[in-house]
Amino acid sequence: MSAKISVDEAFPNIARWLDEFGWIELGQDDYSRSFIRVLDQGGMVWEGKDQYKSLDHALRALEKALGKWVEETT
């Protein structure tokens, strides 16, 4: 039996972003071509690609980008 981990454990940078900085939008809309977007009160902080192989790939890209952002700005 495999051990289950929480989303917060799997994606700590995403969890921190949502707790401390702003919000995340997933999916296509009429205003942006990206599949995933990260925003705060000042606007767009990061925008991903227009498509990913899977939601898992999108979340991993987001986790990496937010880790870099937090490292550079805090």
Image (cartoon, grey):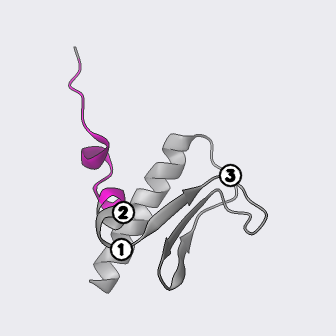
Relative to 30, is 6 above or below? above
Instruction: Look at mark 1 in the image and give the residue it sits on.
Output: 21
Q: Residue 61 carries which label?
A: none
Would you say the residues marked 1 and 2 are in contact, meaning their CB atoms lie under 8 Å apart?
yes
Res. 35 image quadrant: bottom right
**Label 1 crowding class (10 Å Cα cut-off): few <14, some 14-19, many 20+?**
few
- Which residue type carries mark 1? Phe
- Which residue type carries mark 3? Gln
Query: Which x, y percent locates residue 72?
Result: 33, 83
Instruction: Look at mark 2 in the image and give the residue it sits on.
Output: 18
- Which residue type carries mark 2? Leu
Cα–Cα gap, marks 2 and 3:
22 Å
Q: Give the range drawn in magenta.
A: 2-15
Q: Which of marks 2 and 3 is nearer the N terminus?
A: 2
Q: Which residue is drawn at 30% across and 64% down?
A: 19
Is 1 part of what is drawn in magenta? no
Query: Which x, y percent locates residue 50?
Result: 70, 58
Q: What element carries label 3?
A: loop
Q: What element carries label 1?
A: loop
39 displayed left or right of 53: left
Res. 13 image quadrant: bottom left
